[in-house]
Image (cartoon, rainbow, N blue to C red):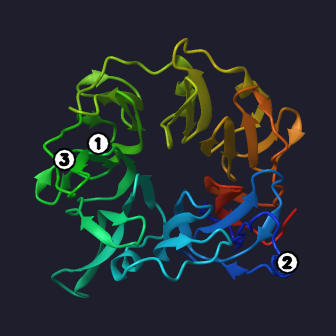
Amino acid sequence: MRAGASLLLLLAVLAVSGCSASLRAETKAAVIRKTSAEPHYTYLALTSRSGKILRLSNLAVSSAVADGRGGWYANGAIGLARLLPSGKLDSSWGSPESRKLGCSVGCRLVKVGSRLYVAGQRSETVPGPGGEARVSVVAAFDAGTGARLWVSSSPSQDVYALAASSTRVYVGGAFTSVGSAKRHRLAALDAATGRLLDWRGPRISFDPPASAAIFALTLDGSRLYVGGTFTSIGGKRQFYLAALNPATGALLSWKPPQAVFGAYYPMQILVTRGQLIIPGYDGFFAASLRTGRKPSWLGKIRGSAGTVTVDGSLLYLGANIDQSLSSVGGARRNNLAAIDLATGRATSWGPDLAPYVDVSEIVPSGDQVLVVGSFTNSIG
């Protein structure tokens, strides 16, 4: 949540198609909670076809992924949990370790096959007054049961980005070490054991040096895209975005299309249908990976997007108070919209939440779309 915003937070949860009359009635009762000094995230679920809000909740969720069964896995102040298609917590899923691995903001959650990889914080005993501190960790959990499989050595500072393959978990952030081993903002863990690998990404530089960090990681075939606050990488002058060899960590000769530089540094990197889509710190841009040109649909957006998700040919767009999205294809939108990349046309999906919408993630699952963010108690 942005500083200085005095808001009420809502959480809306999507119900399955053909829901009962009693469930429809239940959706009319919004749960409202005042914000505090600490950032809080709630979630809002909407139908993917109409955008109708079906249910509100106040669960403290920061990040989510689809579970493949119409529900979601979610992480946040609630710990790591599974949400049923109704939006309620699955009480049969989880473990003591999953419930303790939580965070208020900055959570990262990735699902690969039957495993969940999570960046969060846990309590550890430390010397000195208080005797306890929250430290950053990366952990793996069984998606079927919620049992913890492994937990990593602690990075020295926060983890901001995760990407994973069947063999490696790539980690990016502001850290300078993982456990006792030096790693500069990038590291790789063994996906089976969590062991830190002898994989080293190129060193990044920024002014001031302490602000150098990796905020986005995306694995796409033979490229590991990295984005963040850097003006050089591997000793070469290159701004904010680069591609690495995922097997070795070596910097590739690939250069970002000129069209994406207006986004400043990437907060997310999406590669789909031959396009590179970048929600950045100070803008939103897209370009063809083959030609470097901007796609035609980009010109139909009035405003910006702070987060994107692709589901088939649909590109979902979410925005916030700093990077607002007011219309797509001439149709009014309130920080939530979708574009069909197959046709380049805006769709009718345009949930209208007023007056304040701050979206951090959009997660389609089955016939539903979960929107993670902060909202006021006025619903269109």
What amino acid does circle 2 point to? Lys
Check contact, mark 1 vs mark 2: CB within 8 A. no
- The correct choice, above or below, for 277 with respect to 362 in the image is above
Q: Residue 246 occupies which quadrant of the picture?
A: top left
Query: Residue 37, position in %: x, y?
Result: 55, 75
Q: Considering only order in the chain, which callout, 2 or 3, is on the residue closer to the N terminus?
A: 2
Q: Quadrant of the N terminus?
A: bottom right
Query: Could you say which disc has been placed on residue 28 in the image?
Result: 2
Task: List x then y, in percent, for residue 325.
Answer: 75, 43
Identify the residue at image location x=66%, y=42%.
305
- Identify the image quadrant of residue 244: top left
Q: Badge 1 is on which residue?
A: 209
Residue that label 3 marks: 183
Residue at 39 percent of width and 57 percent of height: 114
Q: Quadrant of residue 292?
A: top right
> Quick one: quadrant of the C terminus?
bottom right
> Residue drawn at (67%, 35%), measured in percent from left and top?
313
Say above or below: 163 vs 232. Answer: below
Looking at the picture, tell me which residue is in the foreground, 359 or 81.
Answer: 81
Q: Amino acid at mark 3?
A: Arg
Q: Earlier in the sequence, mark 1 or mark 3?
A: 3
The amino acid beneath tag 1 is Pro
Compute the Cα span from label 1 to label 2.
50 Å
At label 2, counting other C-alpha atoms closer than 10 Å, the crowd grade (few under 14, some 14-19, many 20 or more) is few
Which residue appears at 71% of the width and 55% of the height?
367
Helix, strand or loop under label 3: loop
Q: Residues within 10 Å of mark 1 (few under 14, many from 20)?
A: few
